[in-house]
Amino acid sequence: MGIFILLLVIRYLRVYTPNMNSEPCLCTGLRQAALAATKFYDDALQPTGLKITMFRLLRRIDEADAPTMTELADIVRLDRSTLGRNLRVLERLGLVRLSDGEDERSKSIELTAAGSKKLETALPLWASAQRRMKKRLGDHQSMIGEIAAKLERG
């Protein structure tokens, strides 16, 4: 998704605000690229009723085998507060179950049978979208990870 973001950044660099004069805002370009990539995957997952953000959490929970809130927050790089809000949506939909713990941090998360089935249905749709995205990005795919790594290092 990184290269797609870069290509979209370049495309959207001409987006200005009145206070920016002639200098394009890289942050705006990155955000618009991320929104376009999110829409691309959301559209692909639409038959399942999942958004890419929901799919991502289901997939990581499945891969991590009942992680705690803290472990999952580290895996998906979200603060626990944001993660908790997102998990409550999945819990209301009956896709995840949060076990009892001493506090929010120690609760473990697991997929319900419905969550496993939803993930199973969504995986081929995601894989197809991933192939189309890779084809669209071509040789620029590696730039996504490079950009993300540079930004995370600060």
Image: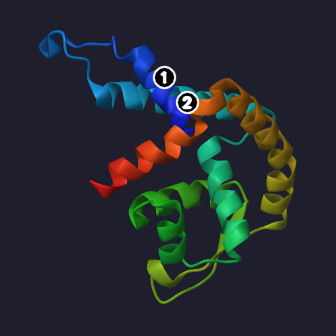
At x 86%, y 48%, the residue is: 121
Question: Residue 152: where, in percent of width, then height?
Answer: 35, 54
Question: Residue 134: where, in percent of width, then height?
Answer: 70, 34
Query: Dot 1 lies on which element?
Result: helix
User: Quarter-wise, where is residue 98 in the image?
Assistant: bottom right
Query: Dot 2 lies on which element?
Result: helix
At x 41%, y 52%, the residue is: 149
Q: Is residue 54 left or right of residue 2?
A: right
Disc 1 residue type (three-letter): Leu
The answer to whether residue 66 of the structure is visible from this angle is yes
In 3D space, how far apart are the residues under numbered discs 1 and 2 (Cα atoms)?
Answer: 6 Å
Camera-side residue of 28 and 23: 23
For disc 1, the marked residue is: 8
Residue 150 got which mark?
A: none
Kindly check if marks 1 and 2 are in contact, taking CB atoms under 8 A apart as contact. Answer: yes
Residue lying furthest bottom: 102
Question: Residue 154: where, in percent of width, then height?
Answer: 26, 53
Camera-side residue of 103 and 29: 29
Above or below, 32 relative to 56: above
For disc 2, the marked residue is: 4
Question: Residue 89: where, in percent of width, then height?
Answer: 59, 54
Tell me the crowding category of disc 1: few under 14, some 14 to 19, or many 20 or more residues within 10 angstroms, Cα based: many
Camera-side residue of 105 and 140: 140
